[in-house]
Amino acid sequence: MTTAQFDCQYCMASLLGKYVLKDHDPYRVTCYDRTFSNYCEECKEPIESDSKDLCYKGHHWHEGFNYAKRSQSLVEKPSTAKDECLLCSEYYSNECSSKCFHCKKTIMPGSRKMKFKGNYWHETCLVCEHCRQPIGAKPLISTESGNYCVPCFEMEFAHYCSFFKEVITSGGIMFCDQPWHKECFLCSGCRKELCEEDFMSRDDYAFCLDCYNHLYAKKCATCTKPIIGLRDTKFICFQDRQWHSECFNCGKCSVTLVGKGFLTHNKEIFCHKCGSGVDTDM
């Protein structure tokens, strides 16, 4: 404000006392307040030219404004907005800020926080269980005993693939008490992946069923198809011959011979009734 003798730019009245300059134009104090003053968000009254105007994100308050939760003045105090309300930093930190999953203390606004499995951590609290170094944005592996950086996990717990000799970080299978990557566990014959396949083993080598049948499986004396000892497969052995249980039938009347006495003649097998008139071996 200043003192002079000329006219108000709003009401054109002579300015004989105090006035306010705006953009180099003089205004009576009352005209200035009526025309240019901001309105207080709290009391809805104009903030006059002789009062301090507190401004935050386009909103204005009188100097005596009290913040939402404690009715204490925020003049010259740090504050934070939440849900259109102004809160002092102390209240916001205690009531609204995230709590660290590890130490249970407040994660102060502006400080770096880490999120892992839906929980928040101080950056200095999310550390490797072995080397105790902050994990930060680096990859980590979580176990029942804690969180580990990848190098420490590999050193402490990881299995190494029997074929590729690299760490198995997830999944994997065991064969002959040795760990394997799923993509490394292959048929020793045709080299296709076996992790989702039925397989057989021979001398500690794994084979898909097709390769095993072709290389090693015994053939049924009746149907000549491979006999696979898989799951509940049942078969009969006699001397140097084998049969599927469903193929072990009398060569004449076709009655099943499983669990029964039988007679043989050359390559044929017979029930006692059908074999009684044949010169048999048994």
Image: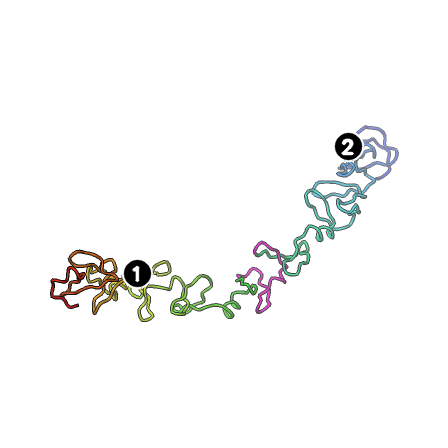
- As shown in the figure, which amino acid type bears the numbered disc 1? Thr
Q: Check disc 1: other Cα within 10 Å, few if <14, some if 14-19, many if 20+.
A: few
Magenta stretch: dominant secondary structure: loop
Q: Is residue 142 left or right of residue 277?
A: right
Q: Position of residue 79 (x, y in %)?
A: 73, 49
Check disc 2 and give the amino acid type: Thr
Give me the residue at 59% from left, 67% from top: 133
Q: Secondary structure at mark 2?
A: helix
* Element type at mark 1: loop
CB of mark 1 within 8 Å of CB of mark 2? no
Name the image quarter holding the N terminus.
Answer: top right
Which numbered disc, 1 or 2, marks the residue closer to the eye? 1
- How far across and how far down the image is residue 66, in percent? 78, 44
The image quadrant of residue 111 is bottom right
Assess disc 2: are there few (<14), some (14-19) or many (≥20) residues with their C-alpha within 10 Å of its C-alpha. Answer: few
Q: Hey, which quadrant is residue 235 in on the image? A: bottom left
Asked if residue 275 is positioned above or below residue 81 in the image, the reply reads below
Residue under circle 1? 233
- Residue 62's tag is none
Tell me the distance, in whole angstroms, between the alpha carbons under discs 1 and 2.
98 Å
Span of residues in magenta: 117-139
Residue farthest along the right direction in this orientation: 16
Residue at 71% in and 43% down: 85
Closer to the camera in the image, 198 or 254: 254
Mark 2 = which residue?
Answer: 35
